[in-house]
Image (tube, helix red, strand yellow):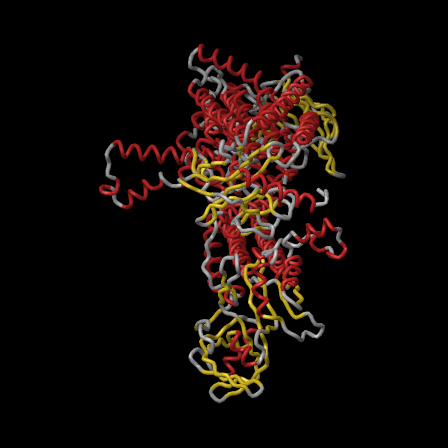
Amino acid sequence: MEETQVIIRTEQLGRRYGAITALTSLDLVVEKGDWLTVMGHSGSGKSTLLNLLGGLDRPTEGTVQVAGQDLSGLSENELARFRREQIGIIFQQHHLIPYLTALENVMMAQYIHSVVDEVEARGALERVGMGHRLRNRPGELSGGEQQRVCIARAIINSPALLLADEPTGNLDGGATRMVLELLRELRAEEGFSIVLVTHNQEVAAWGDRTIQMDDGLVIRDDLVGGTPA
Amino acid sequence: MLLLLTKKALLSRPGSTLLLLFVVILGTAAATALAGIYGEISHKMALELRSYGANILVEPDSPDGSGHLLEEDLARIKTIFWKHNIKGFAPYLYGAATVTASGRSERAVLAGTWFAKPIDVPGEVRTVQGVRVIAPWWSLQGGYPAAADEAVVGAALARRLRTGPGGTVTALYQGREQQFKVVGVVTTGGYEEEQFFAPLPTVQGLLGMEGRISRVLVSALTVPMDAFGRTDPQTMSKADYEKWYCTAYVTAVAKNIEEALRGSRAKPVWQIASAEGALLTKLDLLMVLLTVMAVAASATAVSACAMASMARRNAEIALMKALGADSYQIALLLLGEIVLLSLLGGCAGYLLGQYLAELVSSRVFSSSLTSPAWLFSVAMVSAFLVALLGSLVPLRRALLIEPVRALKQE
Amino acid sequence: MILRSALSLALLWGLLSCCLLAAGETGRLRRRIVLAFSFTAGAVGMLPLLASMPGDLPFALLRMFIAALLLAMVLVSSAALLSAPGRGVRSTIWRERCAGWGRKMAPVLFPALNGALATAILAGSPSTSRLTVVAVTVVTAFLVASLVDLLINMLPYRPRFTTLTLFLLASSLLFCSAAFSPRLDLFAPLSMKIMKFTHDFLHQFMESMLLPDHLFINPPTWNFVGFFFSQEIGFWGALLLWFAPVLLVCLVVSRTPLPSVAHVRQGARRRSLIAAALRERRGLLIIPAVAALVLAFSVYRSQFPDVLYWDPAPIAVEATPAGDIAIPLKQGELDLRDGKLHKFSYSQGSTLVRFFVLERGDAVVVALDACAICPPDGYGQGEGSVFCYYCKTLIPLETVGRPGGCNPVPVPFTSSDQTLRISTLQLVNLWNSTVQVTTKNAGGKR
């Protein structure tokens, strides 16, 4: 496999919180453009994995490389820079700033990245189908709409990797499908990779590859196939 | 965008913003008012102390304080080496007499003095000397005596005698009697209020001590005392003595006067000579302390307010961090709010502080305040200090927020 | 007092060499030598000037140089603003050439001027030994220049200079040094000149338009017009001119065009490029900001000088064949009746007589620059008094002209049709007899 085609490479990755082990010796390689779904119960280590990939947390063992950068060697501010340039994040609870409009929420991500460009931010919201609700605050939007603003915010800085933590956890069936379809379209256009955490089998079906986690271990990987003991 | 974010963030929590603003305004107002009042009183104090004048006391050179100086020598003060540094002087002749007014009788100190007497010394310009020159702080109800039988009564004595301007007082001394017309009542806040002041020749006649005086108060322009000035002239080398003598230290001037008045001993009145420096230093310290405390107190209050509002913003800051904001950006964002608040608070605090200072000044010092221009910069700086000092701890907290944990808590 | 100004000057010189060294790219050691050498040349070169020219002339000359620098800065920065990039190839070539010249010139020009300033300030008063001062100054200059080099290497962040910002900061540091001496300070005479100019201009304008001023102009308008005749106009006008280079350079920097990003397809990449350009532009504004601070400080210095007293340099005067010294009460800028101390010196044979003319109240007084008791250190003028430099005694202004105490010894003079006449015979005799006594008095203990 060509190294330039790899977006994520972890070696013996582990994270321990005191006595609790959240993740142990994970070896994972994800190709560019892939859609990886991580499944498992709550407490199975899938959120820990996501945080480690997004540079929000530091491993206690092993290394993690994202987009060619070894995250363990970066300082706090370098990690922040890595996040704003390489990572887009979508949360289950959306985490939109309540006193800013949809447009301003997207522009804030631009501001953190570099400078604001209102035309571009407007374009991004139109692409996720929110062009008609630019001036609305999050409180005035439905869950699905909020998640679409969230997606616009995540992709505005052209990340290499999109991390989605239960993006459909709070949505009904229709909205879920809409969000996932949007993600698929955007991935085709922009070429970013997706790591999506969910415990919903249906949602997992949208990805190219699924890994199943339990107790900080990968217990099933599509790519390898079968179910390890 | 920074401005927009700041504005919206502030407006999204109007309550805590207003509270913060209020605290900043209070702190600034306190600092401004204190600084304004301080500038005013130190100015007034300096003026007053400078006009306090008399810093050398000349008495007869006898161990028990008895004996007298000669009035005819007085003009010599204007011929001494330091004559140009003598701003004024006034002779006094004291005697204990019985004064009677409207049937009431009191033992009182009868003081003969010059009120404003022109002095002519050959070769010198005519000057006016007397109480009016060296004690300009006398607050007089009525006027100064012009004729030989007119007098000024100290306020306390006048109260006891139930007399005032226009009244008549009779002074009795060893069988001799003299009638005075009261033309003024003097309030000084000192021992003068117990005394009875009359023109020197009249008192000399009454006491039977023509041409004699008990003491002279001299007001001289002097050089502040330093280490060299404090050394004992007796121990100096000739050259040093020359220099000491030709430096207008208060001691040197006093020595000079002593040589001019026969049988006299002149000593600096240290309390007044050094009062200005000491008092102003103390005042300085007090005011600086008060101002620092005002700033510190409001900074603490700001800190508490900011801490509370920061707690509510935890998630926001965590989100920004998750989106890739580094510590500079977070600090900039939070400091932007602080700067905006301190700008607003500084302006409002300045106005309020000035008003307060004026109020205090007119109530306490019964004088109107002319606020100097530098007060505005004091206000702005203290507002900024209050806001900045108050935000340091919350800012540190904000920078330590871990995005993962803070976002999970929602 | 002299120690304090020496320390401040050393600090300013340190800053100057700091910015000149930081702006250079190569040959650190060579640059340092050039800097120190130019400084020494300036400092030593000022000496003969001080020695050969009478009174305030060398100071006026130096001040003229500095004033020319200010004017040049205003002109250059406006030119830079007008010939902003993108105005054609020729203007670009010109800019490059000027910048190259400037870079070559700066390390010589500024240290030399600064050296001259230091000598003038420190050795300008008559009572100090010039050679010692210059020697100490030069040694300090070398020390500071080498120390600064060490410090620069320790800086975590190296500010970026363009030729324009380098000139801006260096010249503001120079103005700041000049503000340490009332005789070299630029800001005060600048505001004076501006006030005079507006006044004269308006006056002439009104006259030439044959406007009868008070008839048609109602009081509010007159108040408005009055502003242009007031002291304030000088101050604000000078302030405007003073900060004009900084403002213009800031404008030049902020007008630097952002890179063209239209060809970059990805929005985030486009924004990154713009953000980087903005960051760089902001970095270029640091130097003008520092320069503005330095300039503000020098205005403060000029308005509230450390030296609260007035200590003019003596102006040398000659005697007429008849043996008189004649000094007109008013001649050019010199006005003896302005209430300030005016010192003169007259030499006859080996004796150099110093005396001063002062108007107190309504009468003009002539007195020796010495008193009957102290060694002849001379007098300075403070608020409402003059004081003896030797014993620091304040002498009330009203009593100047009368003998006695530490008062200056009065000199008899006659005055007729706006001219003071002093007999040299009397003057020299008086000086000799006074100084003989007082020098003996001091017992050689100076």
Residue C52 visible, this orientation: yes
Q: Hey, which quadrant is residue B52 in on the image?
A: bottom right
Picture coordinates of residue C418, whole percent (x, y) = 41, 40
Is C242 rendered above or below residue B211? Answer: above
Picture coordinates of residue C288, whole percent (x, y) = 53, 29
Q: Hey, which quadrant is residue C212 in on the image?
A: top left
Picture coordinates of residue C346, whole percent (x, y) = 55, 35
Q: Hey, which quadrant is residue C49 in on the image?
A: top right
Asked whether, in this view, residue C192 is left or right of residue C31, the answer is left
Is B42 rendered above or below residue B138? Answer: above
The mark total stands at 0
Residue A194 visible, this orientation: no
Foreground residue among B361 and C298? C298
Quadrant where the C terminus of chain B sits is top right
Foreground residue among A33 and B246? B246
Asked whether, in this view, residue B134 is left or right of residue C22, the answer is left
Is C86 rendered above or below residue B114? Answer: above
Is A79 rendered above or below residue C365? Answer: above
Asked whether, in this view, residue C417 is left or right of residue B121, the answer is left
Q: Identify which residue is drawn at 60% across, 21% down.
A: C23
Foreground residue among C381 and B352? C381
Picture coordinates of residue C295, whole percent (x, y) = 52, 33
